[in-house]
């Protein structure tokens, strides 16, 4: 077993438990909702999932730091929102008693829930053990019943060692190819995959369950024999990645397959399992800095599945700077054998 066997097990169970909560939020509160205001289903799901994950981490690794998006100040001022979230958190658990016990069981009180949420305030950096959490990555995908991910990664001295992605609306079967229909209307019935990677230990997928971990299956990116036949993944939102530049890059590579647009780190998971080939996230702003929690788990899983992940300058993503990828611009993920060709096309189009 790897030296991070316990971290991997706890991370997978923590993500699996948090995914139960996000699915409950979708079915009970989010159907037909497009709002992202302060009391939206996304807010409820974000806070609830973050509390559950941090509680599991603090039970097992009390000295570790945590980088997460949410802080509890808003909940301390809004009793209704706090009560809504607490009702979900206190009633969400894994159906397998041993698995639930491994996470420390239920959170003891509403106040303890707020305390756990606030543990996500680490500044990140290059020293020590730091977890990065994105409780609901892909908020619009979540609301439309499309793709979203519950994301968790462990960095040690700035290097990602463990990555886990829970994707409730992705197919369980690793061989199902990506299609545009995955953007919306994908209820989790009969779907849901849990992806994991450990540095030096490969990558795996398994069905997302509500109890103990299901049996894993090794995943790997598929080699691209003919780049012209490849499939791109890109963000749904043009504010996240430049669709026009992407189209020009595809043209340069001779790729005629339409790009598959989906939200969240489900894109990393999809290419890691061979369902797609290339993921591009192209800069739309000179000043925007990517958040580490949006990439840490996916970056590791793709690399452990036989891929290469760099920015548009060909540099590895650097998770040691703080809460953002301050020294990187954009993301290019592709099989190792094709990455250089894709990078060249990207740089020609962007004139980098």
Image (cartoon, helix red, strand yellow):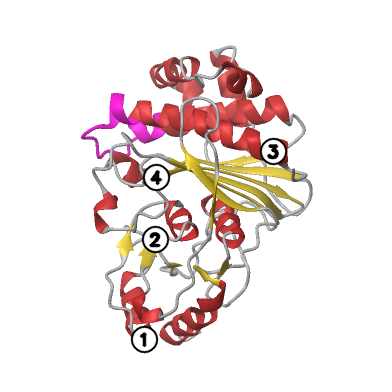
**Disc 1 + disc 4, Cβ < 8 Å:** no
Per the image, the residue denoted by label 3 is 7
Sequence order check: which comes first, mark 1 or mark 4? 4
Query: How many angstroms separate mark 1 from mark 4 (CA)?
Result: 30 Å
Per the image, the residue denoted by label 1 is 252
- The secondary element bearing badge 2 is classed as loop
Nearest the eye: 168 or 314: 168
- Whether residue 166 is visible here, answered yes or no, is no
- The secondary element bearing badge 3 is classed as helix
List x then y, in percent, for residue 242.
36, 69
List x then y, in percent, for residue 88.
43, 19
Q: Is residue 37 magenta?
A: yes
Q: Is residue 226 left or right of residue 332?
A: left
Query: How many angstroms separate mark 2 from mark 4 (CA)?
Result: 15 Å
Mark nearer the viewer, 4 or 3: 3
- Residue drawn where x is 51% and y is 25% of the image: 211
Sequence order check: which comes first, mark 2 or mark 4? 4
- Residue drawn where x is 40% and y is 22% of the image: 81
Query: How many angstroms separate mark 4 from mark 3 (CA)?
Result: 23 Å
- Residue drawn where x is 27% and y is 70% of the image: 258
Query: How many angstroms separate mark 3 from mark 1 (CA)?
Result: 42 Å
Per the image, the residue denoted by label 2 is 240
């Amino acid at each position: 077993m790897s030296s991070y066997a316990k971290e991997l097990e706890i991370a997978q169970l923590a993500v699996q438990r948090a995914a139960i909560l996000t699915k409950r939020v979708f079915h009970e509160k989010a159907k037909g909702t497009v709002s992202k205001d302060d009391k939206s289903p996304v807010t409820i799901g974000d806070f609830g999932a973050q509390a559950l994950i941090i509680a599991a981490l603090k039970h097992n690794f009390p000295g570790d730091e945590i980088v997460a998006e949410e802080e509890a100040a808003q909940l301390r001022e809004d009793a209704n929102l706090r009560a809504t979230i607490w009702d979900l958190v206190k009633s969400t658990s894994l159906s397998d008693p041993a698995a639930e016990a491994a996470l420390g069981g239920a959170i003891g009180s509403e106040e303890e829930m707020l305390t756990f949420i606030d543990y996500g305030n680490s500044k990140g950096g290059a020293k020590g053990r730091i977890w990065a959490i994105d409780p609901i990555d892909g908020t619009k995908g979540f609301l439309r019943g499309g793709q979203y991910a519950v994301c968790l990664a462990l960095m040690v001295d700035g290097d990602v060692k463990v990555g886990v992605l829970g994707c409730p609306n992705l197919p369980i079967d690793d061989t199902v190819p990506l299609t545009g229909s995955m953007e919306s209307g994908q209820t989790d019935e009969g779907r849901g995959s849990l992806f994991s990677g450990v540095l030096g230990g490969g990558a795996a997928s398994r069905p997302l369950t509500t109890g103990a971990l299901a049996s894993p299956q090794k995943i790997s990116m598929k080699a691209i024999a003919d780049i012209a036949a490849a499939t791109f993944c890109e963000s749904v939102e043009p504010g996240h990645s430049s669709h026009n530049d992407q189209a020009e890059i595809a043209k340069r590579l001779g790729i005629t397959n339409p790009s598959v647009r989906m939200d969240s780190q489900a894109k990393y998971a999809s290419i890691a399992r061979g369902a797609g080939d290339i993921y591009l996230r192209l800069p739309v702003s000179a000043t925007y800095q990517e958040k580490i929690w949006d990439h840490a788990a996916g970056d590791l899983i793709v690399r452990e599945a036989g891929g290469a992940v760099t920015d548009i300058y060909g540099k590895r993503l650097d998770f040691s700077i703080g809460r953002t990828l301050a020294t990187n611009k954009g993301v290019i993920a592709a099989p190792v054998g094709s990455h250089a060709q894709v990078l060249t096309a990207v740089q020609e189009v962007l004139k980098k």
